[in-house]
Image (cartoon, helix red, strand yellow):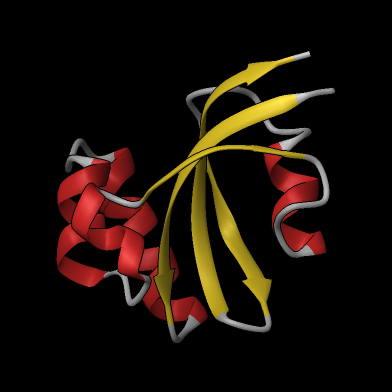
Amino acid sequence: MTQASARHILVDTEEQCLKLKADIESGTDFAAVAREHSSCPSSRDGGNLGTFGRGQMVREFDEVVFSAPVGVVQGPVRTQFGYHLVEVTDRQD
């Protein structure tokens, strides 16, 4: 079964998500942004979600994690929880 590791940042608005993505693309550390801005409890660990299989996350999140290139920040990804920036850190097929 395919497994992936990812980290994310969860915010309330698409606008904030886009601003944070621009900051990260300009060199700001993803984990530091997650600790400061993400509303998910994973923010304490820099947004790290650990390793999980297909179907363990909500559909919109799952689609990104199992298709995006490793190490490239994706988003905004809208789910029932808000807007996410997602970075796949590893994927094993």
Judge from the rendering whether residue 80 lies leftward or rightward of residue 86; answer left or right.
right
Residue 51: quadrant of the picture:
top right
> Residue 22 location in percent, x, y?
34, 53
> Residue 30 location in percent, x, y?
27, 44
Judge from the rendering whether residue 34 lies leftward or rightward of residue 17; answer left or right.
left
Q: Nearer the viewer, residue 11 or 56?
A: 56
Judge from the rendering whether residue 14 lies leftward or rightward of residue 78; answer left or right.
left
Residue drawn where x is 33% and y is 40% of the image: 25
In the image, residue 12 above or below residue 57: below
Residue drawn where x is 48% and y is 24% of the image: 71
Q: Nearer the viewer, residue 10 or 51?
A: 51
Q: Which image quarter holds the C terminus?
A: top right
Residue 78: quadrant of the picture:
bottom right
> Residue 11 location in percent, x, y?
40, 77
> Residue 31 location in percent, x, y?
22, 45
- Residue placed farthest to the top in the image? 93
In the image, residue 45 above or below residue 4: below
Residue drawn where x is 17% and y is 43% of the image: 28
Residue 37: quadrant of the picture:
bottom left
Q: Nearer the viewer, residue 90 or 78?
A: 90
